[in-house]
Image: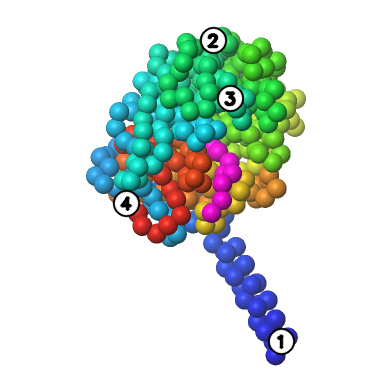
Amino acid sequence: MDNFRRTAVFCSAVLLASTLAAQVKTGQAAFEDAVDEKPGNRIHITLADVPPPHPDETVANGPQLVPRNGAIPIAKPGYRVELYAEGGFKIPRLIRTAPNGDLFLADSGAGSVIVLRGVGANGRAAQREVFATGLNKPFGINFWPADNPQYVYVANTDSVVRFPYKNGDLKATGAAETIVTGIPGGGGHWTRDLVFSKDGQRMFVSVGSGSNVDDPDTHPAENHRADVLEYKPNGTFVKVFAYGIRNCVGEAVQPETGELWCSVNERDLLGNHLVPDYITHVQDGGFYGWPWWYMGGKQDPRHAGKHPELQAKVITPDVLMQPHNGSLQMTFYEGKGLPGVAKGDIFAAEHGSWNRKERTGYEVAHIPMKNGKSFGEYEDFLTGFTTPDGKVWGRPVGVTVAKDNSIIVVEDGANTVWRVTKGEKQN
């Protein structure tokens, strides 16, 4: 009987594993339409799935925004989704958790940084203050040193500034000190993120390309763009840390390994399924292809014959995401208690496509990790930002983990902030 039971348990486990494996969307099925995104869907796009260029497929298909009308983002059973803040934002973007638990939100359109604190009886932010104003398209926010910060750093589109700070400050206690100037601006991709290395001795600033595929050889405006730049915390330039990354919108440092990771928007106008956006660890000195090449050592046909010496240097990213889905901020989960989520997993905000026939993105993705490494797949975690007929009310732009282990999500369609916790009820 014991052998029978052991055999039955083993067979059940094998059956469950095979069933779960069958639920992972691969091949052409991996290229989802936004209306098919459902919490729990698992996606695994590989190099073998990446098609050849089809520029003829390119369409203008920007989101048609509609009022929210009480709509609520959708999570898997076992989660509770509540409205945390709304109103008064112009173009909300990145959000980061301060060491004391306050949430610092960049309102890029208003040129300000806002602090959200606590949770009231109604589930909303208990307190909301404007920390600083007069900034130039602020995006990246971070705290230095990490445990007992003396400064809040803010990345403007053309500079990095810092404010004196101690845990609990709701308003800047001094003027902004500019420590980095000359960050190239203009063109597209105005967001600049910044993070510090695990030891606090290095500052990484991401600068997206100013164009889709302009050749830096002939377009000087692309100098020091599509790069991650390394500085000392005092603002001294060190080097180009990594290059050929078209637009590393979101940065994060893996808490176990100390590796820098990027959430990247890839290039457009090569087809519905090309080139996949991606999330990846970033190698010191690494080359990621833009604009001459892309993942798998494939040459962009618009630069045929250029820089053959770089083909073998192109690094394949860790996680290939939906093409054109607009992968923005990412964060590592360092909390506990969320069903199906492990410490060290990644959450990423997907802003949504504008030039793909079938819309994609408009969600928060969950990337399972183990020992600081990914499996190459991701899960649709928070969806419901689109309507059944393909219209859009919400566009996720920011995500962070709060001190109480909840996930905080910012979107700029209806300009709302959401709080995702363990539970059943959704309000």
Q: Give how far across and how far down residue 53 sits, in percent.
A: 55, 37
Q: Which one is earlier in the sequence, the residue at label 1 or at label 2?
A: 1
Residue lying at 51% horizontally and 41% vertically, measured from the top left: 403
Q: Secondary structure at mark 2?
A: strand
Pick the residue in front: 113 or 327.
113
Q: What residue is disc 2 on?
A: 178
Density class for disc 1 (Cα within 10 Å; few <14, some 14-19, many ≥20) is few
Pick the residue in front: 277 or 252.
252
Q: Give how far across and how far down residue 72 sits, in percent.
A: 33, 48
> What mark, if any, has residue 427 been given in the picture?
4
Residue lying at 33% horizontally and 46% vertically, measured from the top left: 121
Q: Secondary structure at mark 1?
A: helix
Q: Which one is earlier in the sequence, the residue at label 4 or at label 3?
A: 3
Quadrant in the rendering for residue 319: top right
CA–CA distance in space, label 4 to label 2: 43 Å
Quadrant of image for the N terminus:
bottom right
Residue lying at 40% horizontally and 26% vertically, measured from the top left: 114
Q: Is residue 80 above or below residue 153?
A: below
| Residue occupying the far bottom of the picture | 1
Q: What residue is disc 3 on?
A: 149
Question: In the drawing, does residue 64 fall left or right of residue 422?
Answer: left
Q: What residue is disc 1 on?
A: 2
Q: Given the image, on which type of amino acid does mark 3 rest?
A: Pro
> Which label lies toward us, 1 or 3?
3
Quadrant in the rendering for residue 216: top right
Q: Which one is earlier in the sequence, the residue at label 1 or at label 4?
A: 1
